[in-house]
Amino acid sequence: MKVALIQQKFHNNKQKTVEKTLDMIKESKQKGANLVVLQELHQSQYFCITEDTQNFDLAASYEEDLKFWSDVAKKYSVVLVTSLFEKRTEGLYHNSAVVFESDGSIAGKYRKMHIPDDPGFYEKFYFAPGDLGFEPIETSVGCLGVLVCWDQWYPEAARLMALKGAEILIYPTAIGWFDEDSDAQKQKQLDAWMTIQRSHAIANGIPLICVNRVGKEKDPTGVIDGIRFWGRSFICGSQGEYLKVCEHEDEVVAICELDMSQISNVRNIWPFLRDRRIECYDGLTKRYLR
Amino acid sequence: MKVALIQQKFHNNKQKTVEKTLDMIKESKQKGANLVVLQELHQSQYFCITEDTQNFDLAASYEEDLKFWSDVAKKYSVVLVTSLFEKRTEGLYHNSAVVFESDGSIAGKYRKMHIPDDPGFYEKFYFAPGDLGFEPIETSVGCLGVLVCWDQWYPEAARLMALKGAEILIYPTAIGWFDEDSDAQKQKQLDAWMTIQRSHAIANGIPLICVNRVGKEKDPTGVIDGIRFWGRSFICGSQGEYLKVCEHEDEVVAICELDMSQISNVRNIWPFLRDRRIECYDGLTKRYLR
């Protein structure tokens, strides 16, 4: 299977940003990709940088967006992983990854389960926690364990996807630095972020695709300066080994051939699923055990 | 808190090996360590390289071993993490980490929960799976989440320790390469092993100490050539950042000051425990979900 990830900037408005995305999907297809993965909330700025009810308007086009990306998947005949701002009803929104089959049909949807909230990332204001659980999505290119951004810090999420048959983990993401952080702190954050995702590939013996936004976006309210999204999208194999790593600052179409037979080779010699002590894991369903 | 890890070789017999360990504990103490961590099954060769009932004799001295290491902890006034072959009764053995308080008392014991079994690592033959659960051990230097080797591939184990209050994760280990593996494969295995452990520090916001054996040990039956234990013991902080990394081939006493106030700083800005979707984690207690 040939996969493409599209790491991009926000180009000041939806139309220009989506045009750029379409160019990059076209390039992905020309280079032979069967699966194309877009970054988190790829149609807009990362609006969660501030709490503003005006931003809910960005979800008003959700039904049109579905139609639009369905047409794109069909036109290029690729399985397409999108990340959309879903309006479910008045006052109820989700951060949703919608996966389109190469014929334009909806293969499945994942609503972001773990919702962050920290300065500049006010997602609990915008998104209700997902209520579809951790269900991988069956497609013509395999069973996709699609999770979103903050989920990537939770080994529980990746494990549940794997236990339900996911053959690949996919994380559309929007994470970055504050310019005022020290270089050492920035490096630590980046390393931690790459490390924990690679660990999900390792723990579950399946490859992983992570697509992160790039470029600086300002906080319109000036409470903070802004976020410099650090790019560094990557693809790793089922032992966590890097297959592709993107740059910090540039828009990138990264293409990678994934050898899915690796899963079986790796899992047979590192059979972690065999030895789980499931009778002793009840505590995982508790908030804290003291 | 100042911690020491002792990475060492097997010196052909128990007496010489233990003498060397004592030298290194003495050095640790002289350098100011309050906590000393030894590697997996540090008194003997890694006997699980083959299945041989004669090797159960190595556990016959378990009660004496307890007394011996208790005296060592008291003599040097350090909290000491040992890894012993525990004989519980005839035909029932465990791979147990016993933690001694600096006054020589037993602070607690952990019986290895996840038991591996693959060529050269026939542990299911020797060790009954632990029945003490994932319980951290309270000591004068903090609450220690002691796990052993194969456990390090399981995010569940680290999480349960953290949920029960562990302030540091500790992994005595014996892992190595087969000389006939390619350099690329060796590097992949080593990277995966370091990555997944660092991820446990990151996911739980606590530091981690991993102590691995070093040196080549032959398979006495000749079924395989032997195992070249890859050393590379390391200590990382609560964002998974390396604080110490040991060499591949040498015996090492590695000393490191751990700033335990980091835990609170890191957890307050990366509050992963806050957002766990515990009501959706039931599946983790199942073997597989298809």
Image: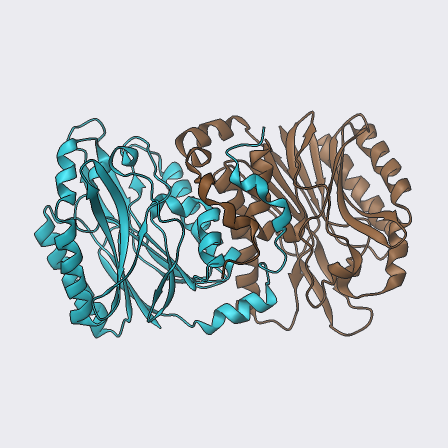
Chain colours: A cyan, B brown
Q: Quadrant of the N terminus of chain B?
A: top right
User: Does B11 appear above or below A128?
Assistant: below
Tell me which residue sits at (33%, 32%) in the image.
Answer: A118
- Front position in the image: B23 or A115: A115
- Residue A12 placement, left or right of A92: left
User: Does B267 appear above or below A277?
Assistant: above
Tell me which residue sits at (68%, 53%) in the image.
Answer: B250
Tell me which residue sits at (52%, 26%) in the image.
Answer: B261
User: Does A175 appear above or below B218?
Assistant: above
- Front position in the image: B57 or B225: B57
x and y, in percent, of residue A81 in the image: 27, 59
- Residue B259 placement, left or right of A126: right
- Quadrant of the rendered image containing residue A129: top left
User: Does A152 appear above or below B1?
Assistant: below
Tell me which residue sits at (80%, 25%) in the image.
Answer: B103
x and y, in percent, of residue A127 in the image: 27, 39
Residue B32 visible somewhere in the drawing: no
